[in-house]
Structures are given as C-alpha cells and as structure tokens.
Image: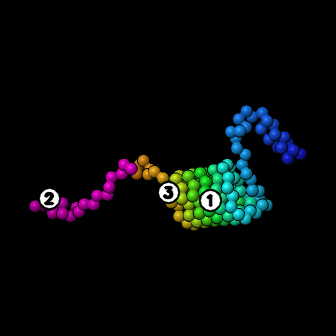
C-alpha cells in the first residue's frame, strides 16, 4: 500500500507540475544492483549499489550503501559511501560516513568531520581571492640591525 501511494504521488506530482521538464529524474542504481562497465550521463546518477567502472555525469550521489571502483568525472559529487579511485569534480562534498580511497581533483570541497580519506585532495581552478593579496615572504636578519643600533 505504501509503494502504491508513493507511485501515485509521483505520477500526480509530475502531471501537475508545470516545470516537469526542468526537474531531472535521477538514474538510480539500487542497493542490490552491481554494474560492471562505464556509465555516461548528462543528468544525475544515484548509486546505492556497486559500480566497477568509470562514471561521467553532471551530478553523482554515492549513497551510504553505495560503492564505486573507478574514475569519476562530474560537476558535483556527494559522497556518503565508498569511492575507490580518482574523482575529477568541480564541487565535492564528503560526508562523515564516506570513504575516499584515491585522489580527488576539485575546485571546491567540503568535508564533514569523521570522513575517511586515503589519498590526495588537489585544488584546481582560479586562485582563492584571499591568497591573491598575500605579500611575498620577506626574511630579515634582526642580528645585523641590533649591531647597527648599538654603534
């Protein structure tokens, strides 16, 4: 009965929503599903199962029970489960339940306390504005100034 209500709600929500084209429906790889091979998508992918292969998409959500072994290329990555491989993303979010084993190349990153990361997080893109205004490091020898002051 619960599934029927949910299905009817989704049908009516899509039918009466005037911007139905603007709301993309994610591709879901459910908990009991295993995929061997590469996945390419222009939309959103939600992984709660296991994927062995590369994933390229607009937005990827790896759920708590989800795992991916391979290279991920996406604009947005929300990691709650396990990613074993390389991630090349614009925006990266790593939850406290997540495990990242490999390198992540990102423009912006958010990491919750408790997340497990075994690899490198490498920032790309334009420099941070605060870093642009930092002066160069200047090293002075105070000993020679003290000697000059005593004379």
Report which quarter residue 1 is drawn in. top right
Q: Are marks 2 and 1 in contact (CB under 8 Å)?
A: no
Reading the chain from its start, which is encountered first: label 2 or label 1? 1
- Mark 2 or mark 3, which is nearer to you? 3
Callout 2: SS: helix
Answer with left or right where residue 140 lies relative to residue 72. Answer: left
Residue 57 location in percent, x, y? 64, 53
Answer with left or right where residue 21 lies relative to residue 133. Answer: right
Cα distance in 3D space between marks 2 and 1: 62 Å
| Residue found at x 74% / y 53% | 28
Cα distance in 3D space between marks 3 and 1: 16 Å
Callout 1: SS: strand
| Residue found at x 39% / y 50% | 132
Q: Which residues are magenta?
A: 132-151
| Residue found at x 78% / y 33% | 16
| Label 3: how many Cα within 10 Å (few below 14, some 14–19, many 20+) | some
Viewer-proximal residue, 145 or 103?
103
The residue that mark 2 highlights is: 149
Q: Are marks 2 and 3 in contact (CB under 8 Å)?
A: no
Cα distance in 3D space between marks 2 and 3: 46 Å
| Label 1: how many Cα within 10 Å (few below 14, some 14–19, many 20+) | many
- Mark 3 or mark 1, which is nearer to you? 1
Residue 59 location in percent, x, y? 64, 51
Number of marks in the rendered image = 3
Does the magenta-highlighted stretch encompass residue 58? no
Q: Which mark is residue 123?
A: 3
Answer with left or right where residue 108 lies relative to residue 83. Answer: left
Q: Does the rendering let one see residue 76?
A: yes
Q: Of all residues shown, which one is farthest toward the left?
A: 151
Picture quarter with the C terminus: bottom left
The residue that mark 1 highlights is: 72
Viewer-proximal residue, 49 or 41?
41
């Amino acid at each position: 009965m619960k599934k029927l209500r949910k299905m009817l709600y989704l049908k009516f929500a899509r039918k009466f929503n005037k911007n139905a084209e603007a709301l993309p429906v994610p591709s879901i790889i459910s908990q009991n599903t295993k995929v061997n091979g590469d996945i390419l998508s222009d939309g959103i992918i939600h992984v709660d199962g296991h994927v062995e292969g590369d994933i390229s998409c607009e937005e990827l959500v790896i759920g708590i029970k989800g795992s991916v072994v391979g290279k991920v290329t996406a604009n947005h990555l929300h990691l709650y489960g396990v990613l074993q491989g390389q991630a090349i993303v614009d925006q990266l979010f790593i939850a406290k339940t997540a495990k990242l084993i490999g390198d992540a190349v990102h423009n912006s990153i958010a990491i919750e306390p408790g997340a497990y990361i075994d690899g490198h997080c490498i920032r790309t893109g334009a420099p941070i504005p605060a870093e642009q205004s930092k002066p160069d490091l200047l090293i002075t020898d105070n000993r020679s100034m003290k000697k000059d002051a005593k004379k």
